[in-house]
Amino acid sequence: MQPFRKERLFFTLSHMEKVKILDLEFSSFLTKETLESRIAELAEAIDSDYQGSTVVFVAVLNGSFIFTSELVKRCRVDCEVNFIRVKSYENTTSTGKVTEIMGLESDLRGKHIIVLEDIVDTGLTLDTLLRKFAEEKPASIQIASLLMKPDKLQFPGLPLKYIGFEIPNDFVVGYGLDYNGLGRNLPCIYTLIMEKEG
Ligand code: XMP
Ligand code: MG
């Protein structure tokens, strides 16, 4: 491995305007800097709201892995970090059911839970998870999601307290989010370029 040199910083910070993943093209939408400064605000809000308590973060894999690490490393409140895995998307649309849930911890009783998601779309995934968690009688449950599509939401009762960005309905990738498994490593969020009709 080469030693780190200052000149390389340019490449670390710059990003591509457009990317192609499989058959689809995406354009740059939210930069790394925009994402990180908003995540810092979310961490500050969580620190202030949970002062003196211990938070149990439950990160929903796979999509939330970058958001989770960027958020928790900025939080100063005492916290545990747990991971669960669910799946509800195929290609670029929701299958309408949560097909897999793995790694659910069962000692949530009396704990302050914050569920970490990459994106809230219809809200089905979180509604399913929160119902399961509620059975364990936690002291409180909140949601922190990097992104949300307000016009798609079908579960208005969800406790969506910490939302990074409200975005349009278009499909997005990068920063943990994928298109058929690819694109999770992109350092910022990209949005699908729609074909113009006619
Ligand atoms: P629901 O409908 O359950 O969906 O709120 C949430 C899950 O669906 C995935 N999702 C996306 N993944 N780009 C993605 O890469 C998107 O635009 C998108 N919208 C939803 C995601 O896994 C999320 O946890
Ligand atoms: Mg997800």
Image (cartoon, rainbow, N blue to C red):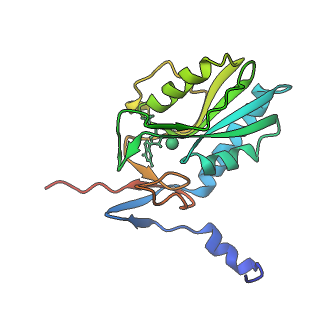
Q: Is residue 100 left or right of residue 42?
A: left
Q: Relative to 69, does residue 169 appear above or below in the rendering?
A: above
Quadrant placement of the C terminus: bottom left
Looking at this view, name the residue that lies furthest to the left.
Answer: 198
Residue 150 position in % (x across, y down): 44, 31
Residue 158 in view in this figure: yes
Residue 133 position in % (x across, y down): 61, 23
Q: Quadrant of residue 18?
A: bottom left
Q: Residue at x 35, y 50 (%)?
A: 91
Residue 85 position in % (x across, y down): 55, 41
Of 176 and 90, the residue lying toward us: 90
Of 108 and 167, the residue lying toward us: 108
Q: Is residue 197 left or right of residue 86?
A: left
Q: Ligand 1 appears in which quadrant?
A: top left
Q: Relative to 89, does residue 107 appear above or below in the rendering?
A: above
Q: Residue at x 63, y 67 (%)?
A: 13
Residue 123 in view in this figure: no
Looking at this view, name the residue that lies furthest to the bottom.
Answer: 2
Q: Residue at x 69, y 49 (%)?
A: 69
Of 90 and 164, the residue lying toward us: 90
Q: How many marks?
A: 0
Q: Residue at x 60, y 51 (%)?
A: 34
Residue 156 position in % (x across, y down): 46, 20
Q: Quadrant of residue 113?
A: top right
Quadrant placement of the N terminus: bottom right
